[in-house]
Amino acid sequence: MPTVTETAITGLAFCIDARCPGYNQQPVQAVKRLLEFSFVEQGGDLPGIEHSTSQVFFADEADAVCQHCGKPRLVEDHERPEYANASGRDPMEIFHYQGQAANTLRELQLAHENERLRHEAEVSELRGQLAAQGALMERMASQLDDLTAARRRPARKENE
Ligand SMILES: [Zn+2]
């Protein structure tokens, strides 16, 4: 078993979401736990510590939730390193693309929906025209029947 030493420290907490205002590190009460593994414990025979690891925890679990967005927060014992922007590109670029992609998708969906509505309107207009033509054809057919009947009747009368 390693030797465990816990120390109360001021940790730096931050939201896991880089787009959240809570991403900026904030000081909080934290606990640093140091685990030390001796040579003997690792199978050796020298005195002293072979290696050690450390973990940082929130002293108060209530600090583990971001007050801006409710997502989990992490806590560290050091300031977040800032690296020079060697690429010259915006580090948040991918998020802008995501926004653009979402916009493009929305535009496509909207265009598709408009196209569908336009098509539906066309179909319903055509149905209306078809129904009107059907009614007209029926009227014409019945007039034709009347005309045919009217022609036959006098013809029969002439034969009588
Ligand atoms: Zn947040």
Image (cartoon, grey):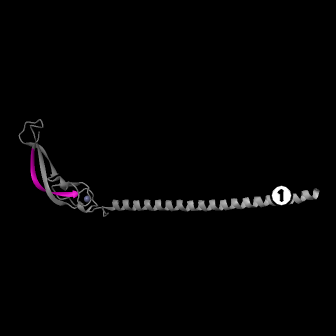
Magenta highlight: main SS: strand
Q: Is residue 148 left or right of residue 72?
A: right
The segment highlighted magenta reads 4-14
In-front residue for pair 120/64: 120
In-front residue for pair 126/52: 126
Instruction: Return the residue found at the far left.
Output: 47
Is disc 1 placed on a helix, strand or loop? helix
Q: Name the residue under label 1.
A: 149
Split into 4 quadrants, where in the image is the N terminus? top left
Magenta stretch contains residue 73: no
Q: Is residue 61 left or right of residue 129?
A: left
Tell whether circle 1 marks a residue whose Cβ is less than 8 angstroms from ligand 1. no
Q: Could you tell me if residue 26 is visible in this image?
A: yes
**Quadrant assignment, res 77:** bottom left
Number of numbered tags placed on the structure image: 1
Q: Is residue 142 left or right of residue 40?
A: right
In this rendering, is residue 39 above or below 157? above
Residue 47 point in image, percent of width and height:
5, 40
Residue 115 point in image, percent of width and height:
53, 61
Residue at 82% from the left image edge and 61% from the top image edge: 147
Identified by mark 1, the residue type is Ala
Residue at 18% from the left image edge and 61% from the top image edge: 26
**Quadrant assignment, res 104:** bottom left
